[in-house]
Amino acid sequence: MTQHFPSSTTESPSEQHREESPDSVPVAVLTLSDTRGPDDDRSGAMIREFLTWRGHSVVAYEILPDDPDTMRDLLTRWIANPAISAIITNGGTGISSRDSTHDVVAGLLDKTLDGFGELFRMISWQEIGAAAMLSRAIAGSVGATAIFALPGSSNAVRLAMEKLIGPELSHVVYELKKHRSYTHTD
């Protein structure tokens, strides 16, 4: 008996999912910093510009100090907002005593995308060497909302947006919403 395998021109499930994914994702951006303001938040500006360039919409933007309770309150409100499909934070993912983003985000997540942090650190290692291990970048989901927590460094933000989040954001949101009754429409 001869087995028939799909030809190499057959689309993979991930390619099919990307085609079915939304063209535009509504995203909230949060910068966590004790020193940055709207005029000098380079990383937050870079995230917003990159999202807009990829066709996504930035529906909320805030700068907060590195305070776990304030951060948790805002993230909880954004997660509950059906007009927000993804949240991207920057800052507070290191190991200093003020860095609490990883801990707050990890405490909110229903599911963790372990591969995001692993890939981020692997790609970072190629650029900055062993210092990449100091990053506690994390991603996952709470219900149908994707959350990505990035370091505050502009180089780290560029890397994450270009190599990881940019190529997969729509696909991640598609996967989170495909079996739910709520779907965002533009």
Image (cartoon, rainbow, N blue to C red):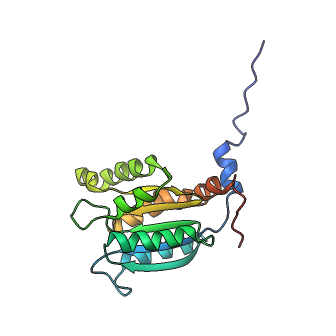
Q: Residue at x 49, y 68 (%)?
A: 76
Residue at figure coordinates x 71%, y 55% from the top left = 20
Question: Image check: 51 left or right of 94?
Answer: right
User: In front here: 154 or 26?
Assistant: 26
Give the residue at the far top of this rendering.
1
The vertical placement of 185 against 164, above or below, is below
Q: Position of residue 17 (x, y in %)?
A: 67, 50
The residue furthest bottom is: 39
Q: Residue 150: horizontal and vertical position, in percent?
A: 39, 63
Percent coordinates x, y for residue 181 in the rendering? 73, 59
Q: Quadrant of residue 107?
A: bottom left
- Compare residues 70 and 13 and report the one nearer the observer: 70
Residue at 73% x, 33% y is: 7
Residue at x-position 48% and y-position 50%: 113
Determine whether 93 is above or below 120 in the image.
below
Tell me where residue 49 appears, x and y as whole percent.
Answer: 49, 76
Q: In the picture provided, is 50 more to the left or to the right than 131?
A: right
Return the residue found at the far right.
Answer: 1
Q: Is residue 104 above or below residue 59?
A: above
Quadrant in the picture for the N terminus: top right
Q: Quadrant of the C terminus?
A: bottom right
For residue 137, above or below residue 54: above
In front here: 22 or 69? 69
Q: Nearer the viewer, residue 82 or 114?
A: 82
Which of the 4 image quarters holds residue 103? bottom left
